[in-house]
Image (spheres, helix red, strand yellow):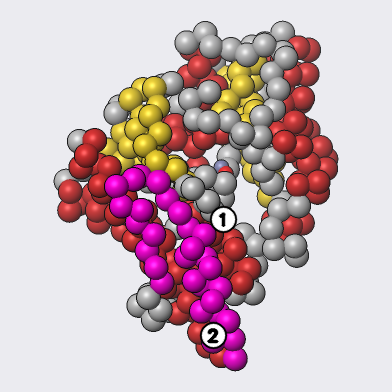
Amino acid sequence: MLVLGIDTSCDDTSASVLKDGRVILSNIVSSQSEIHSKYGGIVPELASRRHIEMIWPVVSEALEQAETALDEIEGIAVCYGPGLIGSLLVGCCFAKAIAYAKGIPLIGVNHLEGHLLSVLLNSPAPDFPFLSLIVSGGHTSLVRVDGVGRYKELGRTRDDAAGEAYDKVAKLLGLDYPGGPVIDRLAKEGNPEAVNFPRPYLHGSYDFSFSGLKTAVRNHIQSVKDRLEEERENIAASFQRAVIDVLVKKTEIAVKKEKIKRVALSGGVAANSELRERMKEMGESLGIEVYLPPLQLCTDNAAMIALTGYLHLMRKETSDLDLTAKAVLPIGT
Ligand code: KG4
Ligand code: ZN
């Protein structure tokens, strides 16, 4: 069975063809970073306009690479939230039109559910239950996953998401957007103990908060502004160490309390080299399995949407053609 997945939730236009919920025949991602980088963040109006231009070429490329055609597609899965409303609408309208014209089932997919199930495309894939740490540009959540559709959000960010903190700190350091990969690279050349930035542990809760850390970085940058050029690597490394200390510690506490033997990472920040290394070390020291999806499945992609759509289609959970985009959409809805 071939399912076409579409994701236009943020600033990437993506389409994927997935065979039998397992084999990724194509996973095309057209990035808009170049458009937004000069503004230091995403400009929603520009994002939706670009999606309109790119949706058809990206879907065509996904079909071509999969050596198939729309007539062969048996289900169309589209991300309908959460995300930027204008961006989401492009994918939703497109998918609804195809579903209607071709008479195939439409499956609206929650972007966060896509991220947390993306690890099922791994080889080997984890068994249920597993703990999922979603760390992306818009979200930071710790979720207990007991099965498809059985999610319990243990904690989430109260302010900035981890990726958002990376992007904002990068901007303060005068680096390009998106900041995560740039800080990841720069941090390798700095001393992570150069600056003792605060670790917002929020004891007794699984929630996260990164805005205070961002403010601490801003204040520090202000205090060294005359020698920022020499300090950049150290600040990047120290900031990254603070973020990762918190992510790892909270995950470790949840593993112990929930008595879970498997942890999966997802979302753009899951591509971070230090976070991946530290999570692996945590797994070894606790004797649990840690699943790290390949980098192209960490950042936004339509293969995870196609997979989630396929799993719901198998359970006969499809959407009506009045499916509408939702900027805010909690996990499990
Ligand atoms: O999951 P994603 O592609 O989009 C959202 O759903 O938000 O995540 C994008 C975020 C951006 O904030 C980007 O800076 C961050 O992921 N990111 C990274 C790395 N690669 C991407 N953050 C840290 N290290 C990386 N290597
Ligand atoms: Zn995402």
Does residue 62 appear anywhere in the picture? no
**Residue at 40% across, 79% down:** 195
Q: Position of 139 compared to 57: left or right? A: left
**Residue at 37% across, 63% down:** 199
Q: Is residue 218 magenta?
A: yes
Where residue 267 appears, x then y in whole percent?
A: 49, 45
Say which element carries label 1.
helix
Q: Is residue 202 above or below residue 260?
A: below
Asked where in the image residue 223 lies, by quadrant, the reply is bottom right
Task: Give the residue pinned by disc 1.
Answer: 164
**Residue at 45% across, 69% down:** 239
Q: Amino acid at mark 2?
A: Ser
Where residue 91 appears, x then y in whole percent?
A: 72, 30
Kindly tell me whether mark 1's CB lies below 8 Å from ligand 1: yes
Does residue 322 appear anywhere in the picture? yes
Q: Is residue 97 magenta?
A: no
| Quadrant (top left/top right/bottom left/bottom right) for the N terminus | top right
Q: Nearer the viewer, residue 36 or 74?
A: 36
**Residue at 48% across, 77% down:** 235
Q: CA distance from mark 2 to mark 1?
A: 23 Å
Judged from the image, the quadrant occupied by ligand 2 is top right
Where residue 179 appears, x then y in whole percent?
A: 58, 63
- Which region shows up in magenta? 197-226
Q: Residues within 10 Å of mark 2 (few under 14, many from 20)?
A: few
Task: Give the residue pinned by disc 2.
Answer: 223
Q: Amino acid at mark 1?
A: Glu
